[in-house]
Amino acid sequence: MGSAEPPPPVRLVREWKGPTVADLLRDEFAARLPGEVRSALRHLEAGELAAAEASLPGEFGAILPGPAAHRRRRSTRALLCALGVAVLLAALVAWANGGW
């Protein structure tokens, strides 16, 4: 078998990679950003990923849609499902009352 030696100690270090999404949503933080970054932030808030990417200076990776980008689709899908259920229920009620 292997030795009964304990594993080496692990030291976790948190690195600061930059502002978080929560930081960017705070008006006082966004006001201190350079103009080009504020412009990109406005495009992101409008869902215009290509325009946000074009407004950033220098070379950056592509801006990818995150989890929040799909909120509109989910709410639209939920609305369409609710509408479909309502139409189905109305048809069932009409059928049960002899309307068909």
Image: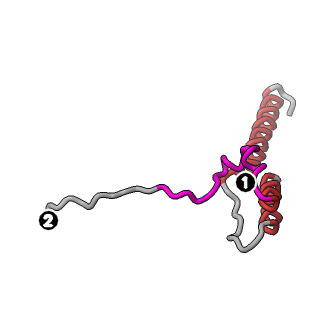
In the rendered structure, which amino acid carries the disc numbered 1? Ala
Number of other residues with Cα within 10 Å of mark 1, as a class: few under 14, some 14 to 19, many 20 or more? some
Classify 23 as above or below 40.
Answer: above
Residue 96 placement, left or right of 6: right
- The magenta stretch is 14-34
**Which quarter of the figure has residue 89?**
top right
Residue 55, position in %: x, y? 82, 66
Q: Between 74 and 100, which is closer to the camera in this rendering?
A: 74
**Which quarter of the figure has residue 50?**
bottom right
Residue at the spot of label 2: 3
Mark number displayed over residue 69: 1
Residue at the image point whose x is 24% and y is 60% from the top = 7
Image quarter of the N terminus:
bottom left
Mark number displayed over residue 92: none
Please report contact status of discs 2 and 1: CB closer than 8 Å, yes or no: no
Residue 16, position in %: x, y? 55, 57
Classify 71 as above or below 34.
Answer: above
Q: Residue furthest top?
A: 97
Q: Secondary structure at mark 1?
A: helix
Q: Is residue 54 magenta?
A: no
Classify 22 as above or below 61.
Answer: above
Mark nearer the viewer, 2 or 1? 2
